[in-house]
């Protein structure tokens, strides 16, 4: 090849020249129309990827902001005495946007060229079948959950906690918008688990469409935001799928600082014994409810607040130990 040769990328009109649009579904037609409108596949994919992330993240967070503003829903609030203020939500939003534009935008924009070099499809239509996509998405969930478990646990040690992960633990009672409230380094570290699964799968199989990745990212964002919502409804997914973590599982992690390091599932915490304090807490909650069933609602709520306060005090001691600012007087898992 001549040193003066240039690489010419196909236009959208060229890549769809032999496609019969009448055979495509509505969403596949809209997909192709996006690429035809932008007329540059690289820009079209990068822009769509980032817009998807922002629209899903803030779109899913807004309902939780509304729920927090309606007193009726506080009966399902895991820590009902801690409702985020508008100021807290605005401070959280600023940090989230900073991380989105400084860390996630470059990572999102660079993901698809790397994945395409491994064989990932982007502009191509039609999409894969659900029979193809569902096992891939299941693999991404399992891979991310395991990666997150070990990386998250590492972030609770020494300098990694003190200088990085501590920001995310600012809120002992999390709310949906705070799912990605974190140090940019943490966003990069834990975000690796989300994109490494698709990259590895594509590298070894050469059989992945970015549309499948978009479904995965959407579900992952829903999971993360809902886990930080601070609400446990009777219809929440963990009451339907017993091994799903959900808000009730992750809320304890923020309240007590320790235990429950996984994201989507409860398996790793159960296998490695990092849910012992959580299970003890649930047993105490159930025992307290049984003992107080004939008491007034105010007395029941006071007993629950007292128990939460005790757990938070233990969490503060555990946090001090992780930072190295307190004597190691309790065992932290």
Image (cartoon, grey):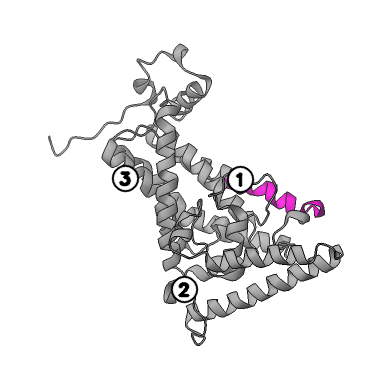
Which label belongs to residue 200?
3
Identify which residue is drawn at 48% across, 85% down.
Answer: 328
The verdict on residue 64 being magenta is: yes
**Position of 134 relative to 139 (above/below):** above
Left-right relation of 245 to 202: right
- What distance separates the C-alpha of mark 3 from that of mark 2? 30 Å
Measure the alpha-carbon separation of dots 1 and 3: 28 Å
Q: Position of residue 321 (x, y in %)?
A: 50, 81
Question: In the rendered view, would you say 291 is above or below 75?
Answer: below
Where on the picture, by quarter, is residue 199? top left
The image shows residue 330 at horizontal and vertical percentages of 52, 81
Judged by depth in the image, the label closer to the viewer, 1 or 3, is 1
Q: Which mark is residue 163?
A: 2
Residue at disc 1, secondary structure? helix
- Judged left or right of residue 190, residue 222 is right
Q: Which residues are magenta?
A: 57-73
Q: Nearer the viewer, residue 81 or 30?
A: 81
Residue 111 locus on image (x, y percent): 37, 45
Residue 258 magenta-highlighted:
no
Screen quadrant of the N terminus: top left
Find disc 1 in the rendering and name its residue. 237
Magenta-drawn stretch, dominant element (helix, strand or loop) = helix
Which residue is at 33% across, 41% downward? 201
Secondary structure under tag 2 reads helix
Please tell me which residue lies in front, 135 or 25: 135
Task: Using a 10 Å C-alpha cutoff, classify the residue at mark 3 as few (fewer than 14 neighbours), some (14 to 19) or many (20 or more).
Answer: some
Reply above or below: 225 against 155.
Answer: above
Residue lying at the far bottom in this picture: please name it: 327
């Amino acid at each position: 090849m001549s040193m003066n040769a240039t690489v010419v990328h196909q236009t959208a009109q060229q890549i769809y020249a032999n496609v019969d649009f009448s055979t495509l579904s509505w969403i596949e037609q809209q997909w192709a129309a996006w690429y035809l409108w932008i007329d540059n596949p690289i820009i079209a994919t990068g822009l769509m990827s980032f817009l998807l992330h922002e629209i899903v993240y803030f779109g899913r967070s807004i309902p939780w902001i509304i729920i927090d503003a309606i007193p009726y829903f506080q009966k399902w609030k895991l820590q009902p005495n801690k409702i985020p203020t508008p100021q807290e939500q605005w401070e959280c939003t600023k940090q989230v946007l900073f991380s989105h534009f400084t860390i996630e935008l470059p990572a999102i924009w660079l993901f698809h060229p790397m994945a395409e070099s491994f064989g990932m499809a982007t502009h191509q239509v039609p999409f894969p079948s659900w029979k193809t996509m569902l096992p891939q998405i299941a693999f991404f969930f399992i891979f991310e959950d395991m990666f997150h478990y070990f990386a998250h646990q590492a972030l609770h040690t020494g300098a990694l906690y003190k200088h990085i992960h501590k920001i995310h633990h600012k809120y002992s009672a999390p709310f949906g918008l705070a799912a990605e409230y974190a140090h940019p380094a943490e966003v990069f570290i834990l975000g690796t688990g989300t994109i490494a699964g698709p990259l590895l799968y594509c590298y070894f199989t050469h059989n992945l469409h970015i549309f499948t990745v978009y479904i995965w990212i959407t579900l992952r964002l829903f999971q993360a935001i809902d886990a930080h919502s601070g609400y446990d409804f009777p219809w929440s997914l963990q009451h339907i799928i017993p091994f799903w973590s959900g808000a009730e599982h992750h809320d304890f992690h923020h309240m007590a600082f320790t235990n429950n390091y996984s994201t989507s599932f409860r398996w790793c915490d159960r296998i490695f014994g990092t849910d012992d304090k959580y299970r003890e807490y649930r047993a105490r909650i159930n025992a307290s409810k049984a003992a107080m069933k004939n008491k007034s609602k105010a007395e029941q709520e006071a007993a629950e607040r007292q128990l939460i306060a005790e757990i938070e005090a233990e969490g503060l001691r555990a946090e001090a130990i992780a930072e190295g600012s307190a004597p190691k007087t309790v065992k932290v898992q």
